[in-house]
């Protein structure tokens, strides 16, 4: 299931699936053990079985999940869709961070905004039509939240840095206690304790 743990959501060029960059690229904390040649063979086989399909975009040939693949992955991972969200970051003209979260329910969106980011932020919400968040699982609408804030990335003294690191530690603990949303399979497993644990093998 490891390849599908990425492909359930993303439209991915093969270069981002190679084992030497997989874990760092997707920030999952685990990877597969296919050689590059084995990976190409496995992707071709998954396409032949109807689990994946290919398409062309600006980066070249990409792989994405089909509805058949989505059903297969869902049987294994048991996704709790009402808790799913994904976020991205950009920088405003004023140099502030703009974080946007897209969720399949307003509860997941609002809870993400409540717990993220850790610094003071200006938050706002809206609703949009589904643009293909999960290509094989359409939704009537999606729920968007935005937070604008200033990153603290400069410290005058070591003491200031240590204070910031302690705040980050407490924030991580808060997320562990109160998080009710998931963005990837490692976070999903909090809500599906009976599902198979992640291993560095398999799809």
Image (spheres, rainbow, N blue to C red):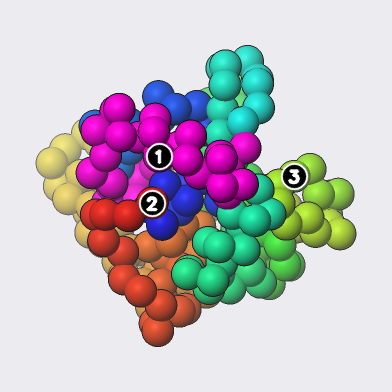
- Specify start and end residues of the magenta stretch as a single range: 24-53
Q: Which mark is residue 132?
A: 3
> Is 198 rendered above or below residue 123?
below
Q: Sequence order check: which comes first, mark 1 or mark 3?
A: 1
The picture places residue 50, in percent across and down from the top left corner, at 61, 47
Element on which disc 1 rests: helix
Circle number at residue 42:
1
Q: Pointer 3: residues within 10 angstroms few (<14), some, or many (20+)?
A: few
Q: Is residue 190 above or below residue 38?
A: below
Asked if the residue under mark 3 is in contact with the one under mark 1, i.e. CB atoms within 8 Å, the reply is no
Q: Is residue 81 above or below residue 192?
A: above
Q: Position of residue 77 (x, y in %)?
A: 48, 69
Q: Earlier in the sequence, mark 1 or mark 2?
A: 1
**Label ID, residue 203:** 2
Q: Looking at the image, which residue is at 16% across and 38% down? A: 157
* The N terminus, quarter of image: bottom left
Q: CA distance from mark 1 to mark 3?
A: 25 Å
Is the residue under label 2 in contact with that under label 1 (CB below 8 Å)?
A: yes
Q: Residue at x 38, y 51 (%)?
A: 203
Question: Which is in the foreground here, disc 1 or disc 3?
Answer: 1
Q: Residue at x 65, y 21 (%)?
A: 56
């Amino acid at each position: 299931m490891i390849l599908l743990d990425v492909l359930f959501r993303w439209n991915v060029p093969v270069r981002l699936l190679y084992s030497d960059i997989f874990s760092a690229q997707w920030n999952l904390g685990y990877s597969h053990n296919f050689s590059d040649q084995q990976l190409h063979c496995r992707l071709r086989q998954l396409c032949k079985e109807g689990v994946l399909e290919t398409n062309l975009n600006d980066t070249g040939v990409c792989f994405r999940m089909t509805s058949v693949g989505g059903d297969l992955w869902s049987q294994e991972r048991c996704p709790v869709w009402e808790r799913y969200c994904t976020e991205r970051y950009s920088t405003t003209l004023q140099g502030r961070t703009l974080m946007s979260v897209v969720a399949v329910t307003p509860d997941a969106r609002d809870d993400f905004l409540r717990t993220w980011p850790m610094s003071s932020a200006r938050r706002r919400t809206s609703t949009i039509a589904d643009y293909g968040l999960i290509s094989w699982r359409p939704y009537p609408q999606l729920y968007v939240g935005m937070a604008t804030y200033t990153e603290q990335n400069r410290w005058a003294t070591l003491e200031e840095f240590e204070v910031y690191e302690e705040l980050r530690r407490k924030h991580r603990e808060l997320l562990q206690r109160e998080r009710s949303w998931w963005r990837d399979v490692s976070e999903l497993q909090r809500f599906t304790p009976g599902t198979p644990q992640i291993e560095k093998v398999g799809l």
